[in-house]
Image: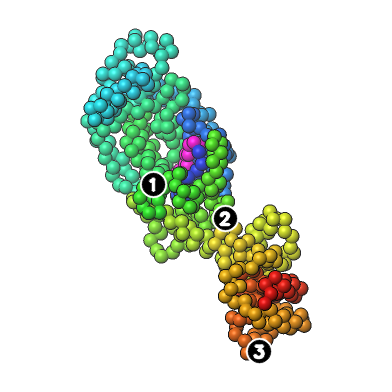
Amino acid sequence: MKEIRVRFAPSPTGPLHIGGVRTALYNYLFARKHHGKFLLRIEDTDQTRFVPGAEEYIIESLKWCGIQFDEGVHIGGPYAPYRQSDRKELYHQYALQLLNNGTAYYAFDTPEELEALRKDSESRKETFQYGPLTRKGLKNSLVLSGEDVEALLQSGEHYVIRVKIPENETIVVQDLIRGRVSVESMLLDDKVLYKSDGMPTYHLANVVDDYLMKISHVIRGEEWLPSAPLHVLLYRYFGWEADMPEFAHLPLLLKPDGNGKLSKRDGDRLGFPVFPLRWTDPKSGEVSSGYRESGYLPEAFINMLALLGWNPGTEQEVFSIEELIQAFSIERVGKSGSKFDPEKAKWFNHHYMSGLDDREVSILLGNILKEREIEVSPDFLLSVSAIIKDRAVLIPDLWEQSHYFFVAPVSWDEKVIQKFWKPETPALLQKLSEILANTEDFTVENIDTVVKTYINDNGLGMGQIMNTLRLALVGGSFGPGVSAMISLLGKNETLNRIDKAIANLGS
């Protein structure tokens, strides 16, 4: 049985979109499920679109996601180098092979000449296509003499090498997700494979590298489906049909409303990240948010992405990475696009946050406190983490849900004051403060008993005391149980906060 070998092959033209992360994830799951190899190849043949820092960003993003590679540009391997610009010398020999067997040809048309042809076609409401119907009337080695071609090459004339699409043929692509895809060759154009600057285009480099790196399955986005017939032809032209990989084209990720592909420009405009990590554009300085910096856990992010296009066939939604590996199959990837739901992404993260060990939460909260230069004991931090972790959706929520444990309120919610703070409140809280001052046992259970006994013995309403006591402790109407907060804050801090509220809010 042929070894399973798959690759993720992004171009360093900007930040890695979550659709690209999903493609990498599905390749990773497929490789691990079948005990195969997964490699990272950087396809940087289009130097005009190269963005500094993009390659490093891609690698860091995938590392944060926990997507591991067996070979790649960052770790090496038996088929190195894994960056196409480092392999450019070898592509020329394969372009020459196609020229020699008559399945490719030199084209000397200038960009200006081609643009004029396009505009002429547009004036007739037609679309110009360099292909089987037009190539015989253009400036290329199919119509020029051998001597003229050689002279043009020797003179340094600009040229490209184009594939020669066959005439009147049905080209078939067998896709693991979409089944049989048939395309008439006369609808295809003679794509450029190689440029006179010595760089191949994506089509040539992609096929050559997949063959040389023994890729068994090409799992990539739906946007590459129109290119698949050309790639099938190239395998045939090279005589590599027996080694051609199987293809699987993944469905699109759609905007939350389902209207169109989720693009790189949709993220912050719609109020959620579309990149795994924050990205700063090196040219404009524009900053785009990332899932990591927004406070998502990588496990939650990956779990959410896995279900955007793939259906496990059960009601299960929460999967560890090991469970995803065991359950994943290409056959259960759908054909239609999947709508991205930002609220579902938050749901997953809340689930994973709630499932963290208290010590893991304390590390996350501790990092936030360090940034704010707040020092507390490890035991206190652990206790706070345990009491607030279920309330946090994103990591920054840990601070929002716990800040009052570390910083006493300096202001109090006006709406809560107007609703609950009455003329008799200061005296009632002062009396409770005196009782608490004489209480030695500050466990949650005993505090609860002490407060409720005071309320009952004085014929007071529960809300009459609890709402104003909460206001004094945290400055508003939020937080966990009052007795739990008093127990954690301790006697001195609790009494100080009650006194401060009485002094500031008065009667």
**What residue appears at the point 41 percent right and 14 percent down from the top-left corner?**
157
Foreground mark, 3 or 2, reads 3
Say which label, 3 or 2, has the lower sequence index. 2
307 relative position to 443: left or right = left
Q: Position of residue 233 (x, y in %)?
A: 32, 32
Say which label, 1 or 3, has the lower sequence index. 1
Whether residue 219 is situated above or below residue 236 in the rendered picture = below
**What residue appears at the point 67 percent right and 77 percent down from the top-left corner?**
507
Where residue 295 is drawn, which disc sits there?
A: 2
What's the amino acid at mark 2?
Answer: Gly
Query: Label 1 belongs to which residue?
Result: 261
- Badge count: 3
Q: Position of residue 57 (x, y in %)?
A: 56, 41
What's the amino acid at mark 1?
Answer: Lys
Q: Nearer the viewer, residue 430 or 302?
A: 430
Which image quarter holds the N terminus?
top left
State which region is magenta.
1-13
Spatial CA distance of label 1 from label 3 is 64 Å
Label 2 CA crowd tier, 10 Å (few <14, some 14–19, many 20+)? some
Spatial CA distance of label 2 from label 1 is 25 Å
Where residue 458 is drawn, which disc sits there?
A: 3
Where residue 496 is drawn, which disc sits there?
A: none
Q: Nearer the viewer, residue 464 or 8?
A: 464
25 relative position to 227: left or right = right
